[in-house]
Amino acid sequence: MRVWISQHWQALGLTAKQFFFKPISNFLSVAVIGIAFSFPLGIYTILENLQSFSDYFVHSPQISLFLKINATETDIENINSRLETFDGITSFQFISNEIALAQLQHESGVGDIALHLKKNPLPHAFIMHTQHMPPDKLEESRVTLQQWPEVAYVQVDSDWVRKMHALIKLGRIAVIMLSSLLGVALVIVMFNTIRLQILTKQDEIEVSKLIGATDRFIRRPFLYFGALQGMTGALIAWIIIAFGIQMINDNLTELSQLYELNLHLVPVSLYQILLLSVIAALLGWLGARLSVAEHLSRIEPK
Amino acid sequence: MVAMITFDNVYKRYPDGYEALTNLVFKIHAGEMVFITGHSGAGKSTLLKLIAAIEKPTSGSITVSDQIVNKLKTSMIPFLRRSLGIIFQDQKILYDRTVFANVMLPLQVHGFEKRVMERRVRAALDKVGLLNKEKAYPITLSGGEKQRLCIARAVVHRPLILIADEPTANLDVAYAQNIMEVFQSFHQVGVTVLIATHDQTILNDSTARILSLNQGKLVV
């Protein structure tokens, strides 16, 4: 057991030495892996952020109910009492057309135009928050409300969220496809890297075989090398994305202050970094293993 | 006496029809020192390669310290080779590492602890008189020193059998004698030593048994 550990330790040491022996060329190939993997990782991170951002809206959808322009006080009271017993509504608020106009004059840049209006063009409205419910249930409520005689138009604010969710779903598939392709590319790159390494170490491999090295022993440093390169590539991808998120967040703070929102991108989690590193290490290992199987047996002592 | 190496009706024929060895029958005892001689092309190197399972015999059987070499599984060949110490005709020194690292290689293959390895490498280098060159790169060594490096690498893991293919080729007489003394000292501590050579002065100086090959046949 001690011998086994010490052999692995030696192989790892050898690999590390190999890695730092040609730092530039090794760094370049690792950087290629890193940059390639930063694409799916970046897209994934943005999707994750969009998801959590939209989840916030999905969890408390808002329904705006606009009354007909000629609605009377009685109509308003009717709706008020009906909404109090309406299923699924947690809270609601009445916004009269005067308040709406005042807000319009106050907030948006069109205040001047609004001031010169002879007649208030805005309808009375109710804004309600509902419980979290599935989209079809929400749609059902919308249809019911729409059928009330006093109601001109019902708008479910989470409609765009549903559309975005569908888009995110598509994006996820794209990420999976991209990562799979790049994963295959990583295996191929490693296959070739190891092939070149085996070629340059032909003498050493031959001598090792002649003095009784097992195939395992000869294979080991190459496998470690593949795994190490894959893992370092993943870490570089993470560093690229971490920088990217930092830069976007710096600018996003400014933007979100304009909209009175607290927007910022959440960085890649530790769990995700670990997972990515492990997968990349496994892929690197696989590429090396295939390469070793293909090329090592060709070197036979004569 | 216990046989260390046994050849039984061994033939080696190459695919092109050339017969390198014909019906070899001989035994080498444990602790014996034996020379194999003959003109170049007589089959000396082929014979040594058969012992180390670098090549397979066409027919017949070869036994090395109770292992039937021609029936060994490929996965077992490394373990056979670990019981041998081979000095190759073309030396096979690795020029990208120091003398010390070259000699350490067999021990790494065996899987020794670092401390043990360092002690053994120094002992082997000391025995061949290269201890002061342990940090040197092989390219800086003289011909005789390179050969001694090969010997150190062959004996560092204390093999049962020491095999040398033309160890004194390209060395002047003084160096050659020095090398032969090193082999003699291993023979004296009980290692079975097998040397292929066509160097007549060495053969004349020695009292060891000589197996003479001529066109692949043993000359009695």
Image: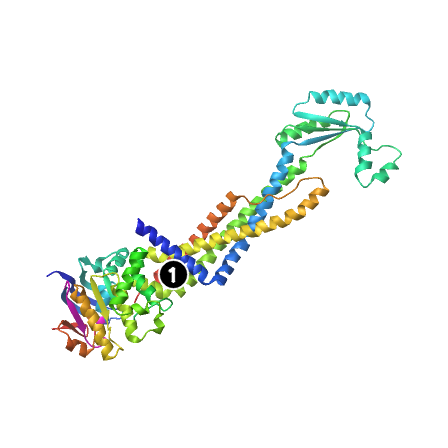
Residue A118 lies, with reference to residue A271, above or below; the image says above
Residue A257 lies, with reference to residue A71, above or below; the image says below
Instruction: Give the secondary structure at mark 1.
Output: helix
Q: Report if residue A6 is visible in the image.
A: yes
Residue B103 is left or right of residue A114, and the answer is: left
Q: Report if residue B54 is visible in the image.
A: no
Measured from the top left, where is residue B29 in percent x and y? 13, 64
User: What kind of residue is marked 1?
Assistant: His
Residue A293 is left or right of residue A109, and the answer is: left
Residue B203 is left or right of residue A150, and the answer is: left
Front-most of B13 and B64? Answer: B64
Mark 1 — on which chain does it sit?
A
Residue extending farthest to the front is B132
Q: Residues within 10 Å of mark 1 (few under 14, many from 20)?
A: some
Front-most of A180 and A288? Answer: A288
Measured from the top left, where is residue A211 in percent x and y? 28, 62
Residue identified by numbered label 1? A295
Residue B189 is left or right of residue A85, and the answer is: left
Magenta segment, which residues?
Answer: B29-44
Q: Is residue B32 magenta?
A: yes
Measured from the top left, where is residue A141 in percent x and y? 67, 27
Residue beneath the point at 55% across and 51% down: A239
Residue A99: quarter of image: top right
Measured from the top left, where is residue A66 in percent x and y? 76, 30
